[in-house]
């Protein structure tokens, strides 16, 4: 087990060096988001705390903007599976304060024991896939506002990127671009062409996984998410919806969509758009927000930012240690008193087992 500790006294640091806690990190059971789970460690008069494999470690919420929590990291040399979970009440507000005993996990129908639970507002790398095809001409100004609002309501430490979709997708903003460049690029958008939406999401996954960003000082976050802003389905992609869903199963990216749908859609792709976006986002633990005016759009953006900043991360060691590379279905539900409340829970539907 490898532990990256927060800053402490020289004596404590020497004690840890003597323990030789520097082995390799292997965490391939789940796609690579959040390979680390933050745990609270005492660093006052104690040199170093030993963490038992059978203990449950709960991380309290950190203060907004705090980076101390992200420095206190637990990594394991076993296949720790990590799952992002969103819990909302009847009014759509994030539910915090839940304990490990409030969650039940089925891995291929086999009950698992939750070993770690975190509820910290950690920074993320957030990529927006914005539809700038010709059909968005009457809605592009609202789409620009939605992008700006996403930035304004995010964690101040979040990274932002932008992919613009028309006949072909293109990377309009990199994660290291300045705020002025971001605004200029969004203001310059001119709708035109068809909608290669699935190609845009495919490019987004590649950009988020691109090692180039891991080298940038401000783009090192392992939590990754995409927000799609579009008025309908795809009509010009090389990749199919089925191929994209398969790719998303392997990727460690949570996908949300804001559907600026017409109330009375006439084109086939517009009628199919809501269902297709739902199928694409739900496999990742995200979901679709259908909006029809600026008020609903503002609410959707605010809700997505709120959910991303108030997620749980739960971890368990799967009872099936096989390394067969097969798809394993996940089901997370609430138990105890939490199951009696009118809460809604969102989590990804599965993961691929490691192969080595």
Image (cartoon, rainbow, N blue to C red):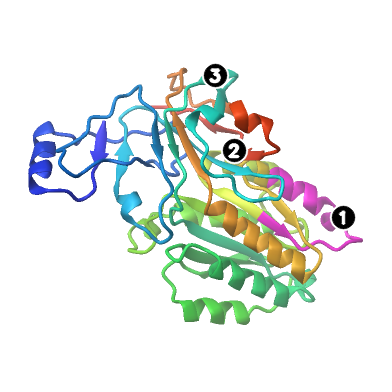
Range of the magenta residues? 257-280
Residue designated by label 1:
268
Q: Secondary structure at mark 2?
A: loop
Between marks 3 and 1 in the image, the one whose residue lies nearer the viewer? 3
The reply, left or right, for residue 144 in relation to residue 105 is: right
* Residue 48 % position (x, y): 18, 36
Tell which circle, 3 or 2, labels the residue nearer the N-terminal end: 3
**Residue 343 visible in the snapshot:** yes
User: Could you tell me which residue is drawn at 34 percent across and 63 percent down?
Assistant: 216
**Residue 334 visible in the snapshot:** no
Q: Examine the rendered structure and indicate whether residue 102 appears above or below residue 215.
A: above
Residue contact at pointers 3 and 2, CB within 8 angstroms: no
Residue designated by label 3:
111
Foreground pick, 25 / 335? 335
Screen quadrant of the C terminus: top left
**Disc 3 to disc 1, how far (Cα)?**
42 Å
**Disc 2 to disc 1, how far (Cα)?**
29 Å
The reply, left or right, for residue 145 in relation to residue 82 is: right
The reply, left or right, for residue 294 in relation to residue 257 is: right
Badge 2 density bin: few <14, some 14–19, many ≥20, Cα 10 Å: many
Q: Secondary structure at mark 3?
A: strand
Q: Secondary structure at mark 1?
A: helix
* Residue 6 % position (x, y): 24, 48
User: Could you tell me which residue is drawn at 29 percent across and 50 percent down?
Assistant: 71
* Residue 132 % position (x, y): 69, 70
Tell which circle, 3 or 1, labels the residue nearer the N-terminal end: 3
Residue contact at pointers 3 and 1, CB within 8 angstroms: no
Residue designated by label 2:
348
Residue 3: numbered disc: none
Tell which circle, 2 or 1, labels the residue nearer the N-terminal end: 1
Between marks 3 and 2 in the image, the one whose residue lies nearer the viewer? 3
Foreground pick, 37 / 96? 96
């Amino acid at each position: 087990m490898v532990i990256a500790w927060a800053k402490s006294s020289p004596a404590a640091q020497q004690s840890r060096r003597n323990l030789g806690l520097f082995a390799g990190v292997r965490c391939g059971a789940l796609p690579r988001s959040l390979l680390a789970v933050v745990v609270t460690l005492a660093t006052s008069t104690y040199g170093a705390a030993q963490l038992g494999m059978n203990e449950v470690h709960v991380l309290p919420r950190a203060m907004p903007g705090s980076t101390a929590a992200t420095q206190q990291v637990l990594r394991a040399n076993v296949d720790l599976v990590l799952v992002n979970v969103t819990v909302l009440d009847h009014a759509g507000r994030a539910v915090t304060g839940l304990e490990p005993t409030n969650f039940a996990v089925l891995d291929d129908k086999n009950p698992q024991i939750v070993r770690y639970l975190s509820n910290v507002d950690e920074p993320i790398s957030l990529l927006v896939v914005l539809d700038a095809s010709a059909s968005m001409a009457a809605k592009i100004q609202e789409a620009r506002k939605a992008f700006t609002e996403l930035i304004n309501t995010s964690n101040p430490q979040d990274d932002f990127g932008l992919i613009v979709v028309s006949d072909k997708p293109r990377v309009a903003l990199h994660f290291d671009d300045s705020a002025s460049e971001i605004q200029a690029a969004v203001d310059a958008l001119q709708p035109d062409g068809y909608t290669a939406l699935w190609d845009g999401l495919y490019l987004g996954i590649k950009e988020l996984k691109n090692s180039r960003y891991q080298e940038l000082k401000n783009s090192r976050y392992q939590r990754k998410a995409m927000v799609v802003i579009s008025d309908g389905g795809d009509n010009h992609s090389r990749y199919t919806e089925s191929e994209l869903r398969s790719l998303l199963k392997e990727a460690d990216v949570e996908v949300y969509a804001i559907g600026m749908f017409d109330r009375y859609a006439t084109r086939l792709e517009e009628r199919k758009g809501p269902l297709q976006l739902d199928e694409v986002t739900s496999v990742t633990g995200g979901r679709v927000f259908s909006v029809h005016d600026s008020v609903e759009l503002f609410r959707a953006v605010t809700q997505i930012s709120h959910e991303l900043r108030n997620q749980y991360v739960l971890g368990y060691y799967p009872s099936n240690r096989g390394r067969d590379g097969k798809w394993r279905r996940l089901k997370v539900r609430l138990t105890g008193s939490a199951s009696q409340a009118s809460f809604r829970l969102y989590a990804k539907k599965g993961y691929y087992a490691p192969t080595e």
